[in-house]
Image (cartoon, helix red, strand yellow):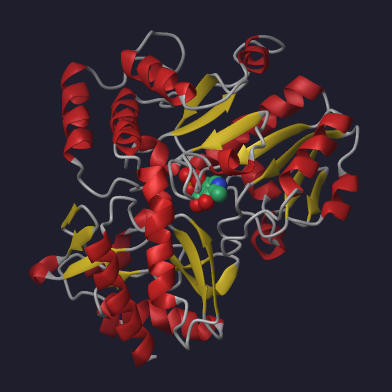
Amino acid sequence: MEKWTENNAHRALFFQHLGQTSPEPMGLEIERAEGVRLFGPQGKSYMDLISGVGVSNIGHGHPKVVDAIWEQAGAYSHLMVYGEFIQAPQVKYAELLTSQLPEPLKSVYFVNSGSEAVEAALKLAKRLTGRRELIGCKHAYHGSTHGALSLIGDESFKQPFRPLLPAVQQIRFNHIEDLALISAATAAVLVEPVQAEAGVVLPQAGYLEALQERCRQTGALLIFDEIQTGFGRTGALFAFQKYGVVPDMLCLAKALGGGMPLGALVTGPDLMKAWQSEPALGHITTFGGHPICCAAGMAALEVILAQNLSEEAEEKGQWFREHLAGHSRILDMRGAGLLWACRLSSEEEAKNFVRVAAEEGIILDRFLFCGSAFRISPPLTIDFQEIDDACTLIVKALERI
Ligand code: PLP
């Protein structure tokens, strides 16, 4: 561990005073970040190939985002709990976001994080349907709060925290036969249209259509979690747009805030109205839709749209594939756009590889539910020269394990 961590002044304090849940944190100190590069003490430079796990889709320190933050901080910061005052950054961002989404996804409820977006969706689905049962997929990750945790697809994460939400069932992603579990008792089915932490599992042809059809037959609401796959990551602004299946509710976070903490539940205005009665104030957030976060997120989305970064992600992803797919250590490369899972021969090997890669100056990571693979999900602004450089370093690191 000592080998791949920086020897810096804050290291001891980091372990002494910061609550840790990872038994082996990367422990790299970063002083500055720009574009795809992170800079540590003594001038050490790293290439960020994971975008803070799907957050920094337009890279670090983008001038448009920095300007938007300064400007909004100068005007006002937090004013009032969410939804009471008319705050231009929230309104303008909701308008831009929904202009990119099909019907019925025209109403946005801002929160602070992905877990909170999921909580909001689950609650609203129960309120709307009067049903209690919720269905999630095996190997899905939706967050660490009690509700979101109840829906994730890995028992080892959940068992120590039971009792969780009752009446939760699990189906296998891409198994059409499991859709029979969705019934007239089901309030909602929560699905990542591309499963991220499972190791980038794409939906098979016809699966999402069949899922939606079953939801329609039974009156269950279909919720897509695009917290990790949104904002151009998979080669479309949102992954569901590639597959032509529009959910009843969409959960967003991560890149939504352009590097600031922001989450959102997007649904139809008719459905969103249910928050206002039985009970009124059916959901409350103090900081949700923080004006500075909305200003930053909107600036980031404008960059994604102006530079066609979603479309570019497809071509750039293929460039990574061309460089790496033939490497003897990589058993399999699965992905879409700029979200790739590269499978090595074992969890131990992948773990070791991520450490060696950091020594070589590239930041990579594994997946929660696919430990033998490492992820490649760089800022969408990465250029082709940077991809060449990154792949050279990846190959160098692969040769050292
Ligand atoms: N859903 C997905 C698909 C995620 O990848 C994550 C976080 O990694 C979450 C939900 C939870 O988001 P947050 O950590 O912002 O609560």
Q: Quadrant of residue 155?
A: bottom right
Name above or below for residue 89 compared with residue 309. Answer: above
Q: Residue at horizontal 22%, vertical 65%?
A: 385
Q: Nearer the viewer, residue 84 or 181?
A: 181
Q: Position of residue 108 (x, y in %)?
A: 51, 22
Q: Residue at horizontal 33%, vertical 28%?
A: 298
Q: Position of residue 377 (x, y in %)?
A: 41, 59
Q: Nearer the viewer, residue 352 or 245?
A: 245
- 94 left or right of 119 in image: left
Q: Residue at horizontal 47%, vertical 88%?
A: 328
- 101 left or right of 213 in image: left
Q: Nearer the viewer, residue 379 or 264?
A: 379
Q: Position of residue 38 (x, y in %)?
A: 21, 60
Q: How many marks?
A: 0
Which residue in the rendered view is the most extreme toward the left?
42
Name above or below for residue 396 compared with residue 232. Answer: below
Q: Residue at horizontal 28%, vertical 78%?
A: 392
Name above or below for residue 53 compared with residue 300. Answer: below
- 67 left or right of 2 in image: left
Residue 256 visible within the image? yes
Residue 19 visible within the image? no
Q: Quadrant of residue 58?
A: top left
Q: Nearer the viewer, residue 155 or 227?
A: 227
Quadrant (top left/top right/bottom left/bottom right) for the C terminus: bottom left
Q: Quadrant of residue 154?
A: bottom right
Quadrant (top left/top right/bottom left/bottom right) for the N terminus: bottom left
Q: Position of residue 233 (x, y in %)?
A: 44, 49
